[in-house]
């Protein structure tokens, strides 16, 4: 059995730092010696451009290619087309071709598990697969959830998207019931936190109160900072761009929490096996 853990970074609300968190968690895990594959599951290809591949249209092989290969049973080399970033993470990129897949998957034999089937061919090469989900709950996101052991939900602390969260939690519950019994919400990551004001502090507290019963809220919070916003145009993680920043420190702490969850799971498996 593969020891790889697959995590979807998911929230159907846009602009909550899904991409930034995927990059910095991924590179953070790689810095701790883990082998990491990032999967861009958004046709906008923003994770791909954020990591430095600006011209996404020129990419010959993307996630769309891999999903088509699974559907048409034409997969020859699952690893081909995976890109290597200089900070030690691999990337399965995306571009606009992925937008057609939401429709194409509708008619596929195992439409919800096509991505899972692809990942099963590459998982043994990685410790973590992180899937950056698009801000909607369509077929591609359903495929991401069906392939995942865990979900991390970045939430902008200043807003209380209670309704959106309810929808997402209910979708994850349905995926668990009908498709993927192993999935669990690993936790909620409070992002874009501005701790300088009383209002911000009280909204973080309110977020804890309103989401705390749905899932764990990570102790680490990602502060709002211009330097973090700048990384998306630099093709780098925050550790390479501004290693001493509060955001780099916050993502390092968050990475440690994610690793600690992984170790807890390993211990549980080991004691189950005894
Ligand atoms: N800690 C931060 N402080 C300030 N700005 C940030 C921070 N992290 C990310 N940003 C900026 O916030 C915006 C949204 O971040 P990001 O693109 O990661 O969100 P997203 O949820 O993936 O968006 P989308 O839903 O469009 O895919 C980007 O412009 C990004 O550069």
Image: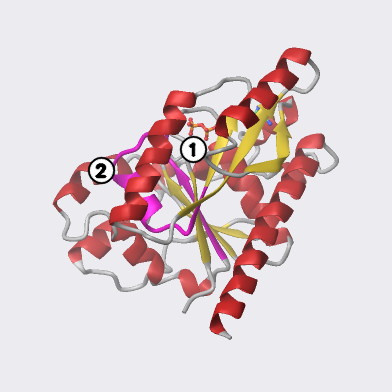
Q: Nearer the viewer, residue 71 or 65?
A: 71
Report x, y in % for residue 33: 71, 67
Whether residue 51 is situated above or below residue 135 in the rendered picture? below
Secondary structure category for the residue under label 1: helix
Residue 17 seen in render: no
Q: Is residue 132 left or right of residue 108?
A: right
Left or right of 239 in this view: 150 = left
Residue at figure coordinates x 17%, y 56% from the top left? 108
Q: Residue at x 76, y 41 (%)?
A: 250
Q: Is residue 139 magenta?
A: yes
In the image, ligand 1 is in what quadrant? top right
Which region of the structure is painted magenta? 128-151
Query: Which one is closest to the eye, mark 1 or mark 2?
Result: 2
User: In the rendered image, which residue does mark 1 sit on?
Assistant: 46
**Magenta stretch: residue 99 in it?**
no
The answer to whether residue 112 is left or right of residue 151 is left
Tag 1–tag 2 contact (CB < 8 Å): no
Query: Residue 120 occupies which quadrant of the picture?
Result: bottom left
Q: Is residue 25 left or right of residue 62?
A: right
Q: Which residue is mark 2?
A: 102
Where residue 183 is drawn, which disc sits there? none
Return the x and y of residue 145 as percentages of the image width and height: 39, 51
Sequence-first disc among 1 and 2:
1
Q: Is mark 1 within 8 Å of ligand 1?
A: yes
Count of numbered circles on the image: 2
Residue at left offset 32%, top offset 47%: 174
């Amino acid at each position: 059995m593969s020891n790889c853990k697959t995590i979807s970074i998911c929230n159907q609300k846009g602009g909550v730092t899904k991409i930034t968190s995927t990059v910095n968690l991924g590179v953070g895990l790689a810095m701790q010696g883990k082998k990491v594959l990032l999967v861009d599951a958004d046709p906008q290809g923003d994770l791909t451009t954020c990591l430095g591949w600006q011209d996404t249209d020129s990419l010959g092989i993307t996630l769309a290619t891999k999903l088509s290969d699974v559907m048409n049973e034409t997969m020859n080399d699952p690893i081909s087309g995976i890109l290597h970033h200089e900070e030690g993470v691999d990337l399965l990129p995306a571009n606009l071709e992925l937008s057609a897949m939401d429709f194409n998957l509708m008619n596929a034999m195992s439409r919800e598990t096509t991505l899972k089937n692809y990942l099963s061919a590459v998982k043994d090469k990685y410790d973590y697969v992180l899937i950056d989900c698009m801000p909607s709950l369509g077929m591609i996101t359903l495929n991401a959830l069906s392939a995942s052991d865990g979900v991390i939900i970045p939430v902008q602390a200043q807003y209380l998207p209670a309704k959106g969260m309810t929808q997402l939690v209910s979708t994850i519950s349905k995926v668990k019931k009908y498709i993927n019994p192993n999935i669990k919400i690993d936790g909620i990551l409070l992002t874009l936190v501005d701790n300088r004001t009383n209002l911000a502090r009280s909204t973080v507290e309110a977020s804890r109160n309103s989401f705390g019963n749905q899932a764990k809220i990570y102790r680490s919070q990602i502060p709002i900072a211009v330097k973090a916003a700048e990384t998306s145009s630099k093709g780098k993680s925050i550790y390479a761009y501004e290693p001493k920043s509060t955001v780099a420190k916050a993502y390092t702490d968050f990475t440690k929490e994610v690793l600690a969850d992984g170790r807890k799971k390993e211990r549980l498996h080991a004691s189950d096996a005894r």
